[in-house]
Amino acid sequence: MTDTAARSYAEALDEADPLAPFRSRFEIPDDSVVYLDGNSLGRMPSETAPRVAAVLHEQWADRLIRSWDEGWMDLPLEVGDRLGTTLLGAGPGETVVCDNVTVNVFKVLEAALDLRPDRSTVVAHKGEFPTDRYVAAEVTRRRGGSVRWLGPLDPAAPLPIDPVTAMQVAGALHDDVAVVLLSAVDYRSGAIAELAGITQAAHDAGALVVWDCSHAIGSVPLDLPGIGADFAIGCSYKYVNGGPGAPAWIWAAPEHHGAMRNPVPGWMGHSDVFAMSPDYSPAVGVRRFMTGTPSATALAAVDVGVGLLAEAGMAAVRTKSLALTTYAVDLYDRWLAGTGETGLAVTLASPRDAALRGAHITLGHPDALAVTQALADRGVIPDFRHPDGIRVGLAPLTTRFTDVHDGLLAIRTLLEALR
Ligand SMILES: Cc1ncc(COP(=O)(O)O)c(C=O)c1O
């Protein structure tokens, strides 16, 4: 019988993995490092440095300011189109790469609230990524509205592991709700929200939906138009491998393009950027969500990451992702779960059903912070998430099954030494 806990089993999975060759397309100076944090900062594609160097040497140094007319001006929409059509199910002209997620949450929430002028409540989850919660609270406060929080009533209660459901959201949807703001994949549990059902429930109640797809893009195939979403935002430094501080993106459903307003009406979102006109007149379509001057080098890096995912194909990425998290949960069950003599008192803070998970799982343990730090000293890099989570990110283009094996074995070894 196959021993799934044996390293040879993980090696066999790597050998059979059709996406395994993609790892060689990334810079991996130390192959012994077990990197389980590609869901925070994806690895660096080998093509990034030459592509960015080409922008620097051939476009900046050589062509100087002429490069704006020779392509740079169109990059936010061109890269946006490639990102949107490959990873979001979007059509052309629906996605723009700009700013960071925080700024984009602000812009899009304001725009969505403006589209529902007689309502001023935003529904969001208590366990949502902090920036989204902070921005939602501020945006509604400015309008004399408020956020209606989903999640446990008791502030001390642990955050739920299960995905946010349409039924849960529907309970909060009164006629004051303008917008529902939620993450497609939860940053802690990795749970995939009930995307289509929640969107439908919000629409039935006359509200709009903004999806934060930061943890979903590049790991879970998305079809934003298919689920009827209104707006989406997300980053490109996780599974898209766009690099540290890579610009974020905004997707807007075409039906909103005419009426949506950017609350930061910068010159780059103007209908005629160099007209220097006295008044702001928004560009047609999603370009109006631009604010100021974009970074041509950063956009080139994002484009490389999108290109690799396009080559791999999101269906194959998801297939491998499911296999990686399933294997991780299997090893968790064998090595870390349970209490007493046999177990190490680690909990699984992610859904058991693989179909309900994105590409990371979170393991709960009271010493999670110390364990995460000690792992880093041993060349194993997951990340810690407050209050007691060891988040294990499994990036399908670069994570090997042997990384899952070695990483979870390192956690077991450390916890055994601690008890
Ligand atoms: C779900 C989610 N939303 C928002 C952010 C914030 O992104 P940014 O730092 O680009 O504003 C992050 C960052 O990791 C995130 O994971």
Image: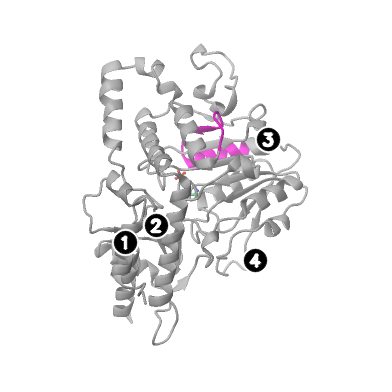
- Residue bearing the label numbered 4: 153
Which mark is on residue 114?
A: 3
Local SS, label 2: loop
Q: Nearer the viewer, mark 2 or mark 3?
A: 2
Q: Are marks 2 and 4 in contact (CB under 8 Å)?
A: no
Observer-nearest residue: 407 or 273?
407
Nearest-to-viewer mark from 3 and 1 = 1
Measure the alpha-carbon separation of dots 3 and 4.
Answer: 30 Å
Left or right: 202 with respect to 65? right
Residue appearing at x 41%, y 60% in the figure? 324
**Mark 3 near mark 1, Cβ–Cβ under 8 Å?**
no
Q: Amino acid type of disc 1?
A: Asp
* Residue assigned mark 2: 394
Q: Residue at x 34, y 73 (%)?
A: 5
Mark 4 nearby-residue class (10 Å; few <14, some 14–19, many ≥20): few
Indicate which label's residue lies in the foreground, 4 or 1.
1
Is residue 98 in sight in this rendering?
no
Q: Residues within 10 Å of mark 1 (few under 14, many from 20)?
A: many
Q: Image point 31% across, 61% down: which residue?
A: 403
User: Does residue 418 lie above or below 133 as drawn?
Assistant: below
User: Which residue is disc 1 drawn over?
Assistant: 403
Q: Given contact means CB atoms under 8 Å apart, are the residues at marks 1 and 2 in contact?
A: yes
Q: Which residues are magenta?
A: 90-110
| Residue 276: % across, % down | 51, 13
| Picture quadrant of residue 342 | bottom left
